[in-house]
Amino acid sequence: MKAEDERWMGVALDEARRGIGRTAPNPPVGAVVVRDGVLLGKGWHRAAGCPHAEREALADAVARCGSEAVRGATVYVTLEPCSTQGRTPPCTLGLMEAGVGRVVYATVDRNPLHAGRADGILRGGGIEVESGVGREEAERILRPFFKVREKGLPWVIWKTAMSLDGRLTRPPGEGQWLTGEEARRDVQRLRGEVDAILTSGATVRADRPAMTIRVPEFLEGRKQPWRVVFTRDGATLPVDAPLFTDEWRERTLVRAGEGLEEVLRGMARDQGVMCVLLEAGGRLSGALMEAGLIDEVVVYLAPMICGGPDVALLARDEMSPLRLEEVSYERFGEDVRMRGVVRR
C-alpha cells in the first residue's frame, strides 16, 4: 500500500505544481481520485475563489466515471482538506457527501482554523484517514503559503545573472544580455511562479525594466505579477518608464521611504503576495540578504569574462557568510543555473 500511496501522491503533487504562482493568497494544491488502482479523476486549485483541488478532482471523476464509481474511492491530496466555510464550502464536507472511503493527505495545514481538524471530521463520517505521504515535497511547494501564515512575510527569491568574473553587465556596446535565450526563457518561467517582482529605484532609473511575463504559456491563467519599486525618493523615478506607462501600469506599486520588512509585510497583507522575485542591483539585494529576508537564491552563470569595473552582487562589506542547501544545477544552452535555499 505504501508504494501505491506514494505513486498516486506523486500524481497529486504534479497537479499541485500547476497552481504555483496562480493561487495567492491560497495555497497551490493538487488531488486525485483512485479506485482499485485506477485513476478516476484529478484536479488542482486554479485561483482564490475557485473550487479547491479535492472538489476539482471529485468533479472530474464524476464526469468521467459517474458518482457511484467515486463511492468508496481513495482521494490523495497534497494538503490537509479544509474544514471551514470560506469563499468555497469546506472540502471535508464535499468528501463526505461524495462517499469516498479513504483520504490520504501529504501535510497538515498550518492555518490554525484548519490545522489537524480534518482527521476527526472525516473519521466521524466513516472515512479512513492517513497523512504524511509525500510530506517533504508537498511542504517544498507550500513554503511561500506557510511562511506567510507563520511570519506574515512572503517567500523571497533573489535572482541574478553574472559572468565568470562576477560582472553583472557586459562591456559597453556589446548588448544587454549576459545569458542566452534558453536561460532567459527560464527566467520567464520563474516569473510565472511568483506573485510579485521587487526592484529598486536605482534599477528603474538605470535600466527601465518591464518586469513582465512575456511568454504566453507562463502567463496563462494568471495576471501579470505585481511590480514593486523600493526607493528612498519616489519623486525621482522616470515617469515615462515602462512600469508606469505600459498596459499593466496598475500592477506597479512604489514604496518610498519605508523599511524593507514593512514593504514585504504590506505586500503579503494588502496584495495577498506569497512569493516575491527580487530583481535588483547589489545594494537592495545586499540589504535584504543582510536583514535575513531572502529565502532562496537563483544564479545564472554565463560562460564569458567581461572585465570592467567591479560591481558587487551583494553590496555589503560586513555580512556574515551564508551557505545554501538543497542546491541544484541545471544547464540552459551554454549557461548554468544554480538554485538553493538559504540556510539560517
Image: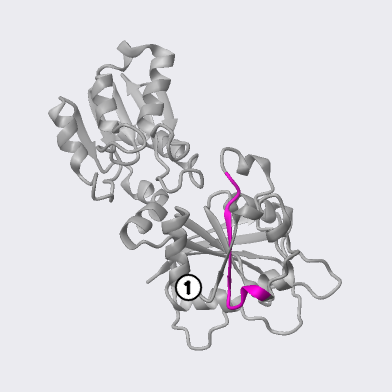
Q: Is residue 332 magenta?
A: no
**Looking at the image, which residue is at 86% across and 72% down?**
173
Q: Label 1: state its secondary structure.
A: helix
Q: Is residue 27 above or below residue 228?
A: above
The span picked out in magenta is 223-235
Identify residue for label 1. Answer: 260
Left or right of 296? Residue 173 is right
* Residue type, numbered disc 1: Leu
In which quadrant of the rendered view does residue 210 lie?
Answer: bottom right
User: Percent from the top left, x then y, of residue 54?
Assistant: 35, 30
| 139 or 284: nearer the viewer | 284
Q: Is the residue marked by circle 1 packed among few (<14), some (14-19), or many (20+) residues within 10 Å? A: some
| 82 or 181: nearer the viewer | 82
User: Percent from the top left, x then y, of residue 170?
Assistant: 77, 72
Q: Is residue 232 magenta?
A: yes
Q: How is the image coloured?
A: one colour
| 295 or 204: nearer the viewer | 204
